[in-house]
Image (cartoon, rainbow, N blue to C red):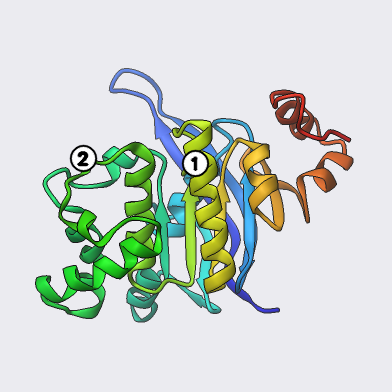
Amino acid sequence: MSALLSLEGVCRTYRRGGLFTRAEALHVLRGVDLDLSEGASLGLVGRSGCGKSTLGRVILGLERPNAGTVRFLGEDVASPARRAEFRRSVQAVFQNVRDSVNPRMTAGEIVAEPLRNFFSLTKGEAVERSCPLLEQVGLKAVDADKYPSQFSGGELQRVCIARALAPNPRVVVFDEAVSSLDMLVQARVLKLIERIRDEQGLAFLFISHDLRVVAGLCREVALMADGVIAARGRSVEELAAMGHPIIEELLASLPPAFPRR
């Protein structure tokens, strides 16, 4: 199956140092090769600071790589001709939901924003279309008139998922999207994500440090270490069988009920 989204040799380097100190290069991504097929659900795991979230931002176009190429449907996303379609087709759901929304906008306006941006709808038309999207993620149409402060964390994450689904994307990047939620709410949101995956056939990249979450949701798992993809398999158990020390470390941090090799 041809790749919907592919990364070839992607590097991201930052310069750190002040006026009176020598600038040093911080190599966060060191030549990442990764592909995501239509309908795939890929979990990207690794230690904190390994470059997972940086890779997510590069994929989303929020940061530009210093080297390498990100391709969507075989074409470089840096191409002006491809940029608009790419921005509509690849959406994101982030960890901190409170920082992801404008507190002065209602839920209906939040979900309607990409509809207005990508489909040239009026504000009224876009807000009207937002109600079915809110219902799709388990909220009510009347919730469209509520402000972020009136929602719980789990409910607001559902609003953010509805916003990501609004422009009919083909890929959704979830960056630690449930890590700030308590266990019960997290389970409900994960069930919602799983249902959307199965019903709509979207491709998901699920970035997380929690192997338990990834094991329950993703059909493939990739391990990131030191800025590269160190291993990839069909399950957490398959990666664990490879004996990679970082997988062993992540497994050791899980509750005893999680199956180990």
Disc 2 element: helix
Which label's residue is closer to the chain start, 1 or 2? 2
| Mark linked to residue 224 | none
Residue at 20% x, 58% y: name it. Answer: 142
Disc 1 element: loop
Residue type at numbered disc 1: Glu
Residue where numbered disc 1 is placed: 176
Question: Mark 2 Cα within 10 Å, few/some/many (few <14, many 20+)?
Answer: few
Residue type at numbered disc 2: Gln
| Mark linked to residue 150 | 2
Outermost residue toward the top in this view = 20
Q: Is residue 3 above or below residue 178?
A: below
The image shows residue 104 at horizontal and vertical percentages of: 11, 46
Left or right of 82 in this view: 233: right
The image shows residue 16 at horizontal and vertical percentages of: 40, 29
The image shows residue 162 at horizontal and vertical percentages of: 35, 60
- Observer able to see residue 69: no
Q: Nearer the viewer, residue 147 or 16?
A: 147
Please identify the quadrant where the C terminus is shown. Answer: top right
Q: Is residue 190 above or below residue 226?
A: below
Question: Mark 1 Cα within 10 Å, few/some/many (few <14, many 20+)?
Answer: some
Please identify the quadrant where the N terminus is shown. Answer: bottom right
**For residue 120, what is the image quadrant?**
bottom left
Residue at 67% x, 38% y: name it. Answer: 212
Q: Nearer the viewer, residue 234 or 50?
A: 234
Residue at 84% x, 48% y: name it. Answer: 238
Determine contact: label 1, label 2, CB under 8 Å. Answer: no
Left or right of 219 in this view: 125: left
Residue at 82% x, 44% y: name it. Answer: 237
State which mark lies toward you, 1 or 2.
Answer: 2
Q: Nearer the viewer, residue 76 or 191?
A: 191
**For residue 27, what is the image quadrant?**
top right
